[in-house]
Amino acid sequence: MRHRVRGKKLGRNPNQRKGLRLALATALLTHGRIETTRAKADFIRSDVEKLISLAKRSKLHDNPARVVHAQRIAASRLNNDRELVSKLFNEIAPRFENRAGGYTRILKLGQRKGDAAEMVLLELTERQ
């Protein structure tokens, strides 16, 4: 039974999972769409949506300390990549200010030829 078992392991140890999460989130926020397997897309989707929600919520407040705090939280989750954090707060989050959620979409592409893994396209819904 899977009662109260949270998260996916993806056949990796914790350090490899952390690196995979960082690489996929960075690629998605940088390029706006990535082609990956269904399991990896499900693995990263909630993390990216939480980052976008964090950036959106920080812009609602006039208190600059809250904005800085949110930027530091986002930076800690994105390996302190300043360019990516500024892109998240200045370009990506304003695109979603009228959307309550659902910042990403998953489009099925079929099976990969080598191992028949289900491939998907994970993309941000409001693309430029």
Image (spheres, rainbow, N blue to C red):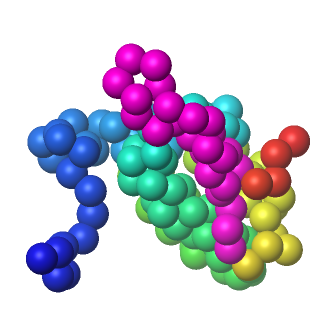
The number of discs equals 0
Image x and y of residue 99, in percent: 79, 73
Image x and y of residue 46, in percent: 48, 63
Residue located at (21% from left, 51% from top): 9
In the image, the segment drawn in magenta is 101-124
Residue located at (21% from left, 37% from top): 16
Q: Main secondary structure of the magenta part?
A: strand
Residue located at (46% from left, 38% from top): 118
Answer whether residue 102 is magenta in the image: yes
Answer whether residue 84 is magenta in the image: no
Q: Quadrant of residue 20?
A: top left
- Residue 118 left/right relative to 91: left
Residue 15 in view? no
Image x and y of residue 55, in percent: 63, 65
Q: Quadrant of residue 116?
A: top left
Question: Of residues 48 and 1, which is closer to you in this image?
Answer: 1
The quarter of the picture where the N terminus appears is bottom left
Q: Is residue 10 above or below residue 93?
A: above
- Residue 104 left/right relative to 22: right
